[in-house]
Amino acid sequence: MDILNTVDTIPLENILGKKSPDEVTEEVKTSGLRGRGGAGFPSGLKWSFLDKSTDKPRYLLCNADESEPGTFKDRLLMEKNPHLLIEGMILSSYALGCETAYIYIRGEYMFILRILEKAIQEAYSKGFLGKNIKGTGYNLDLYVHPGAGAYICGEETALIESLEGKRGNPRIKPPFPAVSGLWDCPTIVNNVETIAAVVPILKMGGAEYAKIGIGRSTGTKLISASGNINKPGVYEIVMGVSVEEFIYSDEYCGGIKDSNDIKACVPGGSSVPILPKHLLFKESTGEPRLMTYESLSEGGFQTGSMLGSGGFIVYDEKQCIVRNTWNFARFYHHESCGQCSPCREGTGWMERVLHNIEYGHGNSDDIDLLWDIQRRIEGNTICPLGDAAAWPVAAAIRHFRHEFEYHVKYPHRVMDADHVYQPEMKTLVN
Amino acid sequence: MPKVTIDDISIEVPAGTTILQAARMIGENVPPAMCYYSKLEGSGGKCRTCLVKVTKGSEKDPRPMPKLVASCRTTVMDGMEVRNTTSPEVTDARKGVTEFLLINHPLDCPVCDQAGECKLQDLSYEHGLAKSRYEFKRREFERKDIGDKIQLHMNRCILCYRCTQVAEQLTPERVHGVLNRGEVSEISTFIEQAVDNEFSGNMIDVCPVGALTDKTFRFKSRVWFTKPVNAHRNCPTCSGKVTLWYQGEEVLRVTGRKNRWNEVEDFICNECRFDKKETKDWQIEGPVSVDSHSVISQNHPKIELPVIQKLIESDKDSTQK
């Protein structure tokens, strides 16, 4: 299904002025659209939290600071279909009553910034942006603002700080941005894909959109597939495709490279827990696991994971989980903003301990130490970056402890930087 | 007025009070605060030592809060129930935070001027481990000179952001701030520039650790060998209410008057702090009562009142002359 890959859009005059902003919001609520940036919060509900009681201007911010390792869907959307995003921005801004909207794009996407700016200029020249859009009396100015390359600026309050020209430190919530966000005005921050999805929702109607997908996971979702698969890339799936089908069907990933066996999968970008093979295709209840918010998080973190932002990373049997975990930890160490102590100190500590284990300098206490560090970071930080750093480490130890133990027990075998994981490792440890 | 229960002790507080302030009103089982400073707007929420567990959100919405919350930034609701020292989860988290704050701290207390009145010492005494589990090299920063009055030891800093808030809220122009990101972020001036304005000295008072110390007091004495005496003077710029720290009859340093929570009552100007270091500059009020848990109290109960008497008399003499 490719409803986000369409160029035939709706005439804006049919919505602006014809439907009231509340009707547009209601339509999005009916559609059951959930935030595509990672948390999966219902978008219509989020919009309804916007404080409309003040005279202050309201702002819509599009979060295009896509920096999660494994996720590259927004990039493609903006690169190939920038006008869909712009139209989504116009419709969403209209629903929220914003007269100024910003697209905050990550600094590394400078070439996309140029694409977007060109598209915005086209929209202005055709009268889709600016004063009195298409004679409906609605005004909207849209700006693109590049970040300077910080993962943390994808957190909504850090994004707001950065947009205000300050250091990109997350704010302490409450107050939530819907009450006091950009320049202390009510603000909504949405992911690129969420805003783009508003266009098909209004085109086909919220109720019709809600029919796509399963249960509370409605609509389509862009999945960035990478790792040891035959066909890496971005796929638009209907929510509810089974994980097994997604990996092995030729329509999507096309199976594991070199016909190897699959070992694990990170289904939603680097910050979500890794799932081993035996939990990946089947839920703990025995039901097949589907690509939906609910099914992937079934059983909590003991047996489940999260759909997250849809960064689907597949590992075959030859990959070393310790090395992968270290790599993720290294990323979070580098990207921690340094504002609150557990994340600032803990992420660096985790990275060093993991580095030791990976390079054969670990000892058996290190695994428990690692567990202790992640446990004390998780939930104790200002923003979710602490959780994002802790979850992959926790899940790796939970599901692949034998690999960590192997590293500690046979350091000489893992000294080599590109050592290949041997499936018989497990028997050596036990 | 909202009623809040902290560790089974109930208190009614004005609306808008935070959990930490309510705990301070009760006066017992107060969560430690390394970054929160009631006199600085926007402070708090960063160090995470004041985490508490909210077991009941409010009368209207009795659901517990899913995560531990920073008590310094969470306002109380009517009927809220909070667990601080009675929750093992909170104690464990606090132990974790203490460990995190200490892993890169140089632990150079023997040569640190803050030793004795350092909040990190108090915190680690209460919640720290006897030995460190951190086996890597501690982080070190290049030394930077930020002026002739204030000594910056970045290695000791816990990044509470209080000093930047002082600079933002008390001085006309902030010349220092936080540079870089994550573990290597540091307090510094952007271009090698001196922090120099009338109220910059307050950075020293608000610093919970020995990262910012008084150059005029440097290596002169351990704080517990000095005796704090309240004094005041007619100062054109500030309230002039200070604490003088005596050794014998010599004033070794001047600081703002700190209350039980280690917060100054009034911010004082640099002239009072750095330049007025003689008894004759001041009107002596009397010895400061020192909270018994502080190491400064080591010699304090034995403070020889006759000495103070003598000082007051000599002060009178000097004014009479």
Image (tube, helix red, strand yellow):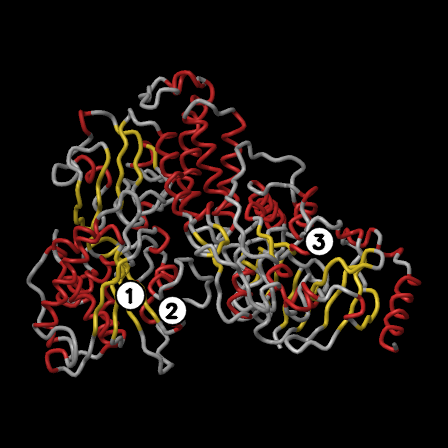
Disc 2 packing (10 Å; few <14; some 14–19; many ≥20): many
**Place of residue B80 in the rendered image (x, y in percent of width and height, measured from the top left):** 59, 66
Residue A61 has which mark? 1
Tag 3 residue: B117
User: Dot 3: what SS?
Assistant: loop
Of callouts 1 and 2, the N-terminal one: 1
Mark 3 and mark 2: span between their CA atoms? Answer: 38 Å
Residue sitting farthest toward the right: B306
Mark 1 and mark 2: span between their CA atoms? Answer: 10 Å
Q: Is residue A232 above or below residue A87?
A: above
User: Dot 2: what SS?
Assistant: loop
| In the displayed structure image, the side of residue A262 where residue A402 appears, left or right | right
User: Dot 1: what SS?
Assistant: strand
**Place of residue B307 in the rendered image (x, y in percent of width and height, measured from the top left):** 90, 61
Q: Quadrant location of residue A8?
A: bottom left
Write down the chain letter for disc 2. Answer: A
Write down the chain letter for disc 3. Answer: B
Mark 1 and mark 3: span between their CA atoms? Answer: 46 Å
Residue A181 has which mark? 2
Between circles 3 and 2, the one closer to the viewer is 3
Kind of residue indicated by mark 3: Glu
Kind of residue indicated by mark 1: Leu
> In the image, what residue occupies the spot 52% across and 49% down?
B144
Write down the chain letter for disc 1. Answer: A
Disc 3 packing (10 Å; few <14; some 14–19; many ≥20): some
Residue placed most toward the observer, B119 or B148? B148
